[in-house]
């Protein structure tokens, strides 16, 4: 079936530490993956994406890793800041399904100052 | 930076009434989407729209739902006869292409059905 799930529903880290948020996906036809950040009362905000022909992509303070063998996606945030506190969702795009994104359950990241 | 805008931010409607949620996608984007998020749950796909046609829809998007691009800037979601279980946040999104491009989301409309 279609499902994107997260291993950890909540994650609490100290300011300055690195954070790792994990995601499992089940559809092997998914070819594009996105991480979104959602703050309270706001819509999902794009953080970083990765195509299935890559296994790593880096942005500013964020890195996404893709392991297609075990259908696993992770988001690494370096030097986590209080402003990073939010719910993080992974989403997968299955090729040729009209652009439909399948979202995971979300992980709430809490950064302690 | 261009953004997706949605109105109203909060809509309160009596059960059985029709409601129209409005969105202005990013101007050079060609693909448009509606998602919903029931409180505390994950974001769920409703429908995608391109070239004035529905590209894909989910099981949630039944005959009570419709979408329209009435002019060159607006994209609307209509629910004909609302039910209590339609209460949710409704997000509009847009992207330049269908595949391999991030979808950019608005801040949503909170729909409360009484």
Image: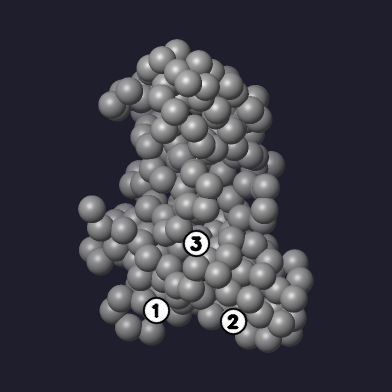
Residue B51 position, x and y percent, is: 35, 72
Looking at the image, is mark 3 or mark 1 earlier in the sequence?
A: 1
Q: Disc 2 designates what residue?
A: B19
Q: Which mark, residue B108? A: 3
- Figure disc tally: 3
Instruction: Respond whether the residues carrying marks 2 and 3 are from the same subunit.
Output: yes
What's the chain of the residue with tag 3? B
Instruction: Choose top left, top right, bottom left or bottom right for residue A63.
Output: top left
- Would you place residue A16 above or below residue A90 in this image? above
At a point 41% along the width and 15% down the height, the residue shown is A16
SS at badge 3: loop
Q: Is residue A62 visible?
A: yes
At a point 41% along the width and 25% down the height, the residue shown is A81
Image position of B8 (left or right of B83): left
Q: How far apart are labels 2 and 1 at the CA level? A: 16 Å
Q: Disc 1 designates what residue?
A: B69
Q: Residues within 10 Å of mark 3 (few under 14, many from 20)?
A: many
What's the chain of the residue with tag 2? B
Image position of A72 (left or right of B1): right
SS at badge 1: loop
At a point 41% along the width and 33% down the height, the residue shown is A83
- Would you place residue B52 above or below residue B3 in this image? below
Residue B11 position, x and y percent, is: 58, 74
């Amino acid at each position: 079936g279609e499902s994107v799930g997260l291993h950890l529903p909540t994650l609490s880290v100290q300011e300055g530490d690195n954070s790792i948020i994990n995601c499992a996906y089940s559809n092997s036809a998914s070819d594009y993956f996105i991480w979104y950040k959602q703050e309270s009362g706001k819509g999902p905000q794009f953080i970083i994406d990765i195509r299935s022909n890559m296994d790593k992509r880096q942005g500013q303070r964020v890195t996404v890793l893709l392991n297609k063998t075990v259908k696993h996606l992770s988001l690494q945030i370096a030097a986590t800041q209080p402003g990073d506190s939010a719910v993080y969702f992974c989403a997968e795009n299955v090729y040729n399904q009209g652009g439909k994104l399948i979202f995971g359950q979300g992980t709430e990241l809490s950064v302690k100052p | 930076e261009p953004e997706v805008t949605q109105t109203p931010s909060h809509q309160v409607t009596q059960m059985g009434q029709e409601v129209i949620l409005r969105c202005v996608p990013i101007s050079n984007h060609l693909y448009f989407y509606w998602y919903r998020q029931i409180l505390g749950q994950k974001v769920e796909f409703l429908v995608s729209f391109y070239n004035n046609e529905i590209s894909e829809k989910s099981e949630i998007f039944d005959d009570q739902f419709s979408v329209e691009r009435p002019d060159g800037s607006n994209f609307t979601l209509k629910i004909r006869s609302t039910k209590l279980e339609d209460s949710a946040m409704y997000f509009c999104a847009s992207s330049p292409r269908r595949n391999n491009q991030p979808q950019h989301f608005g801040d949503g409309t909170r729909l409360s059905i009484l």
